[in-house]
């Protein structure tokens, strides 16, 4: 899984940080999302998917690994 963020779309709601704090953070200066892990471990996949779905600004993009690559989904 690859995660990207678009800070121009971030509205600083913090839902991503509450959902997956190991992967996302917020800047103390402007409240915008910061990415802690571009490629989170498979144990975090479900939380990252949920964070992307909950993001009101649609600032989080997730690219799933191709099936059959040996990467466990969750």
Image: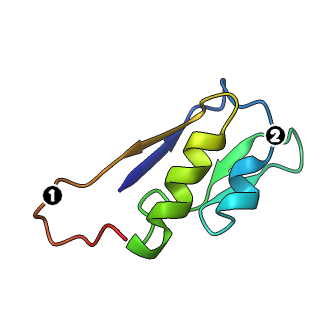
Residue 34's label in the rendered image is none
Name the residue: 56% across, 44% down.
52
Tell me if residue 8 comes above or below residue 41 in the rendering. Answer: above
Packing grade of label 1 (10 A; few <14, some 14-19, many >=20) is: few
Nearest the eye: 29 or 24: 24
Name the residue: 68% across, 59% down.
19
Residue 15, x across and y down, in percent? 75, 48
Nearest the eye: 45 or 12: 45
Tell me if residue 8 comes above or below residue 12 in the rendering. Answer: above
Residue 13's label in the rendered image is 2
Residue that carries the numbered disc 1 in the rendered image: 67
Instruction: Indicate the secondary structure of the residue bearing disc 1.
Output: loop
Toward which corner of the image does residue 72 lie, by quadrant?
bottom left
Residue 10, x across and y down, in percent? 71, 31
Which corner quadrant holds the N terminus? bottom left
Residue 46 is left or right of residue 67, and the answer is right
Residue 63 is left or right of residue 71, and the answer is right
Residue 23 is left or right of residue 41, and the answer is right
Packing grade of label 2 (10 A; few <14, some 14-19, many >=20) is: some
Name the residue: 65% across, 42% down.
54
């Amino acid at each position: 899984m690859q995660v990207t963020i678009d800070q121009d779309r971030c509205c600083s709601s913090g839902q991503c940080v509450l959902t997956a704090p190991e992967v996302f953070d917020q800047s103390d200066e402007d409240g915008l999302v910061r990415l802690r892990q571009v490629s989170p471990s498979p144990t975090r996949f479900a939380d990252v998917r949920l964070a992307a779905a909950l993001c009101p600004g649609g600032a989080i993009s997730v690219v799933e690994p191709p099936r059959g690559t040996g990467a466990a989904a969750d």
